[in-house]
Image (tube, rainbow, N blue to C red):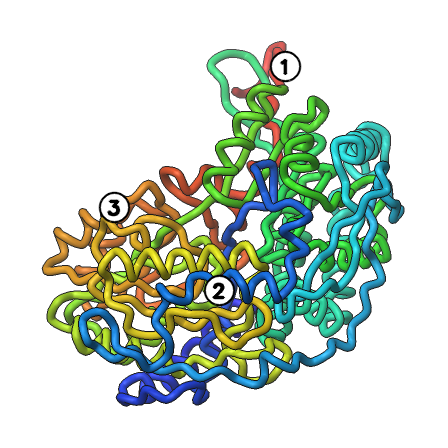
Amino acid sequence: MASRRISSLLSRSISSSSSSSSSSSSSSSSSSSSSSSSSSSSSSSSSSSSSSSSSSSSSSSSSSSSSSSSSSSSSLLLSKGRRGLNGRTIAKYSTASAVEDPITPSVKVNYNQLLINGQFVDSVSGKTFPTLDPRTGEVIAEVAEGDARDIDIAVSAARKAFDEGPWPKMTAYERSKIMLRFADLVEKHAEEVAALETWDNGKTYEQSLKIEIPMFVRLFRYYGGWADKIHGLTVPADGSYHVQTLHEPIGVAGQIIPWNFPLVMFAWKVGPALACGNTIVLKTAEQTPLSALLVAKLFHEAGLPEGVLNIVSGYGPTAGAALASHMEVDKLAFTGSTETGKVVLELASKSNLKPVTLELGGKSPFIVCEDADVDKAVEMAHFALFFNQGQCCCAGSRTFVHEKVHDEFVEKARNRAANRVVGDPFLGGIEQGPQVDAEQFKKILKYIKYGIEGGATLEAGGDRFGSKGYYVQPTVFSNVKDDMKIAEDEIFGPVQTILKYKDIDEVIRRANASRYGLAAGVFTQNINTANRLTRSLRVGSVWINCFDVFDAAVPFGGYKMSGHGREKGIYSLSNYLQVKAVVTPLENPAWL
C-alpha cells in the first residue's frame, strides 16, 4: 500500500537526516536524504476557482518578470551569509547551476483542449491561455480557455449522461471494473504522467513518480472497491411498516481542484463521485491543466462512457464562477483558499442552493514538546513545512518549540534548511523545485519581507534562488510572535516560522488562536501529553510523531475556516449520495 511505502520513506529520511541536522554546517546544498520530501501529499490548496484568480497576463509572466520583481525588493531581503538586524549570521545558501540549465522533459503535450462528452474540443470562444514551466517561466503549451458557455455545454453533457446514459444504470460491479482498469492504465503510464505533472507544476519528479502516482492509483482502487458496497438500510419502525433507506447518486457534480496537487486532488474528487454513480464537470487550475487531460484520456480507454467525466480548463472568475452558480449542477466540491471558498459558497447558495464541500486553507501548528528527540523533531518539522515547496494547505507552518529545547532546535533547523537541496525537479536527489508561478513566487518574497520588517530573526534563506524561474531559498525565521503576518497568514511557500512556548496550556491556547483548523503535528515521547493535545487542538487531523500521512481510507478536512465536509475514506462517499426513505405498509406481518 502507498501508506506503508510513505512510512518507510519517512523513517529512512529521519534516521539518515537527523545526523546532518545536528551538525553545525552552514554550507549550502549538500544532500541530506532526498526521501524526506517523498511523502504523501496533502491536499492542500491554492485557489483555482471562482475567486479573482490570476489573469492570463499574469500566467504568462516570464522569468524576466520574476527576476525584476525580486530585484525590486532586494534591498529589504538579506543576501546569503550577511548578518541580520540582530547581528546573527544568516545561514548561507549558494545558487546552483542546476536551475540555470533545465533538463528538457521527454514527455509531449498531446492533450490541450477541453474534454466534453468524451471528445477533445476547442473552447467556444477559440481562446487559449499559456501554461508555463515554473523552472523558467517559458510556455509549455497553449491550452483551451473555457468560460461560461463551455461550462454550460459540459454540464448539459454530464446531465444527459446521468439522466439517459449507462453510468448510473449499470451495475456497481461494472463501474468498479472500469475504475480498476483505469488505475491499471495510469500505473502502466506512470512515467509519462509523472513527467507531465512535474513539468507543469514544479514538484520533484521523484515525488510525482514514487509518491503521487502510487497514491493516485491506490485511491482509484480504493473507490473502485467501494462502488459495489454502497447500500442503504432496513429500519425498524413503530407500527406495521416496512422502512428502507436508499443511497442514490446525487446527480451532476461540479468539482474545482487546485494547482498544488493536481493529480491527487483529481483522485480525491473524481474517485468517490464516480463510485457513487454520479457524472462530473471538473474545472482544473489554470496553472496546471495538463495532467488531468492526460489521465482523463486513459479513463476513456478504460471504458468510461461519454459525458461521465468532462474537464474544462480556464480561470476562476469565468469558468469557476459559472460552474459554482450553474442551476443544473447538483453538488459542488472545492479545494482552494478560504477567501475563494467564501465566494464559491455564496455562488452556490444564490443559485440552486446546491450542497458544497470545502477543503480550504490552513496555518497548522507543529508542536515540539520538551521531551522530544530534537534531531528527529527538526527533521519532521522540516518535512512538515518544506514538502512540496511549502505549497500544502496543511503544512506545519507554525513551529511551536518548548523553551527547554528551543535554542538547540533553532540552530539545527537553520542548518537543515541551509542544506536542503534545491534545483531542477527532474534531477535525482533534488528536494525542492520552483514555486508554481510568478504570482506565488512574488507572494512568498513579500511575506519574507514582512517577517524581516516585523522584527522576526531571519535564520536562513530569505531571497530567490538562482536567477531563472520561480525558485525560493528555504527560509527560516525565529523569534516569531503570534501577531506577525508570517504567523497569522497562509504563506504557502518554503518559509518556516519558529515560536517559543513555556507549557502545554499556553501552546494549546496559542495553537487554537487561529481562524484555521485544518491539521496539527505533535512531537513528544509522552503518551499523556499526546492524548491531551489530540483532544484539545481544534483541527481535523492530528499527526503524532509523524506528518502528512495520507491513506486512502483516512478522512481529511478542517474545522473553522479551513472548510467543512471530509475527503477520502468512507466519509467522502456521503458527499455524493442522497438518502431516500421508503415506507411501505405491512398487512398482518408475521413480525415487526
In-front residue for pair 91/321: 91
Front position in the image: 376 or 575: 376
Please rate how many residues cluster around mark 2, counting C-alpha atoms within 10 Å: few if below 14, some from 14 to 19, many from 20.
Answer: many
Q: As drawn, is 417 to the left or to the right of 323?
A: left
Percent across and percent down for residue 51 are 56, 37
Determine the CA span between mark 2 and mark 1: 70 Å
Residue 584, which numbered label?
1
The residue that appears at 22% across and 69% down in the rendered structure is 85
Residue topped by disc 3: 512
Type of amino acid under label 1: Thr
Q: Looking at the rendering, which quadrant does residue 160 occupy?
A: top right
Residue type at tag 3: Asn
Taking the image as drawn, is residue 162 in sight?
Answer: no
**Could you say which is closer to the camera, residue 241 or residue 102?**
102
Residue 524 rendering spot, x and y as whole percentages: 22, 68
Q: Is residue 293 above or below residue 206?
A: above
The residue at 61%/23% (across/down) is 580
